[in-house]
Amino acid sequence: MITPAQRYERFLTELKAAGVRLTEQRKVIVKVLAEARDHPNADELYHRAYVLDGSVSLSTVYRTLRLLEDHGAIQRHDFDAGRARFENADSDHHDHLIDIDTGQVIEFRSERIEKLQAEIAAELGFDIVRHKLELYGRRRG
Amino acid sequence: MITPAQRYERFLTELKAAGVRLTEQRKVIVKVLAEARDHPNADELYHRAYVLDGSVSLSTVYRTLRLLEDHGAIQRHDFDAGRARFENADSDHHDHLIDIDTGQVIEFRSERIEKLQAEIAAELGFDIVRHKLELYGRRRG
DNA sequence: TTGACAGATGCAAGTAATTCGCAATAGCAT
DNA sequence: ATGCTATTGCGAATTACTTGCATCTGTCAA
Ligand SMILES: [Mn+2]
Ligand SMILES: [Mn+2]
Ligand SMILES: [Zn+2]
Ligand SMILES: [Zn+2]
């Protein structure tokens, strides 16, 4: 199991290797992302980073998020329209189940569904580049 | 096969039954939606409606879209973040495959995937209320 | 170490999509 | 036909995000 600290170090190593300038702000934002266990939006990330380093601005959070996404380090989601949410991309691919009552996001992975999607696309003459599978549900009472 | 004209009449009947005031603008917007074979966004709908009746405004398009969505007459999609797209909801449920090169939206339905999703949710202790399945792919060369 | 300088930052202003306040208008029940 | 009230167009507001610009700071060569 990879720890947040290991993930943080790996992020920095990869960025440095890619020739990215490691500023104080970027390091703080990367740390917050490496430690996140949820799927925070830009504003939440900004607040978490600001606590660690008051020199972080929301602009830089947005710019860093785009940078990290371009480098494949994080993934962007649009669960609720209008507010992007992020998570680090080092874990294996998974899809999401969102509890419509609490907003809780549960991760899952189904080989069968992944395979089925590829088959459907193939039947239509396509290769899947990426996909979005979100289940919105309610806990069984 | 239901025709656009039939769909238009059905929409109007349902709205009237629901006590919704049938203004000129709403009728035009509903007609445009009934005739749409693609997944237009608010601005596209506005332009199509404006051609039929210059008294339609973008505000009213947005208000009418919300009205129709609340009445279950249309469905809202967020294929590309930042721009909602709409389609009438009278057809059976289906999912979408988006050609990332052309933007073309292809509809499909898979009983197996629908069933699998319900099973996965059940295993996690949930009942699915709605879901979003979008495949983004490239045509096989 | 120390510059030098390209690239990064904060701030404020700018966008793009959508919503809202308000005075004028128009459905529709009577 | 009349009156009440919902609906409209317009412009301003909101939200999430982006960008211009003057200033600052990593990084690297000397
Ligand atoms: Mn996740
Ligand atoms: Mn469709
Ligand atoms: Zn998946
Ligand atoms: Zn489906």
Image (tube, coloured by chain):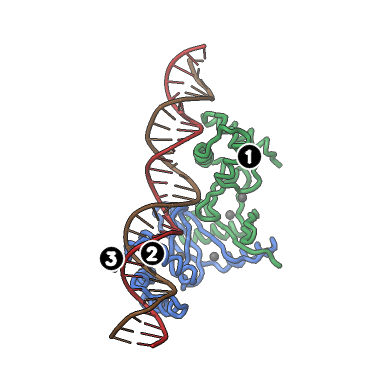
Chain colours: A blue, B green, C brown, D red
Q: Is mark 1 within 8 Å of ligand 2?
A: no
Give the residue drawn at x 62%, y 40%. Answer: B48
Residue of label 1: B34
| Residue C23 placement: quadrant | top left
Q: Position of residue B124 (x, y in %)?
A: 46, 61
Q: Position of residue B76 (x, y in %)?
A: 54, 47
Disc 2: CA contacts within 10 A as few (<14), some (14-19) or many (>=20): many
Amino acid under disc 1? Ala
Q: Is residue B59 above or below residue D5?
A: below
Q: Is residue B21 above or below residue A51?
A: above
In this rendered view, identify the residue nearer to me: B108 or B36.
B36
Give the residue drawn at x 61%, y 48%. Answer: B39
Q: Are marks 2 and 1 on the same chain?
A: no
Contact between marks 3 and 1 (CB within 8 A): the answer is: no
In this rendered view, identify the residue nearer to me: B113 or C1.
C1
Give the chain of mark 1.
B
- The alpha-carbon separation of the residues under discs 2 and 1 comes to 43 Å
Q: Position of residue A65 (x, y in %)?
A: 43, 65
Give the residue drawn at x 47%, y 66%. Answer: A75
Q: Is residue A19 above or below residue B131?
A: below
Give the chain of mark 2.
A
Q: Earlier in the sequence, mark 3 or mark 2?
A: 3
Q: Is residue B139 visible?
A: yes
In the image, which is nearer the foreground, mark 2 or mark 1? 2
Q: Which mark is residue A54?
A: 3
* Numbered disc 2: secondary structure: helix
Disc 3: CA contacts within 10 A as few (<14), some (14-19) or many (>=20): few
Residue of label 2: A61
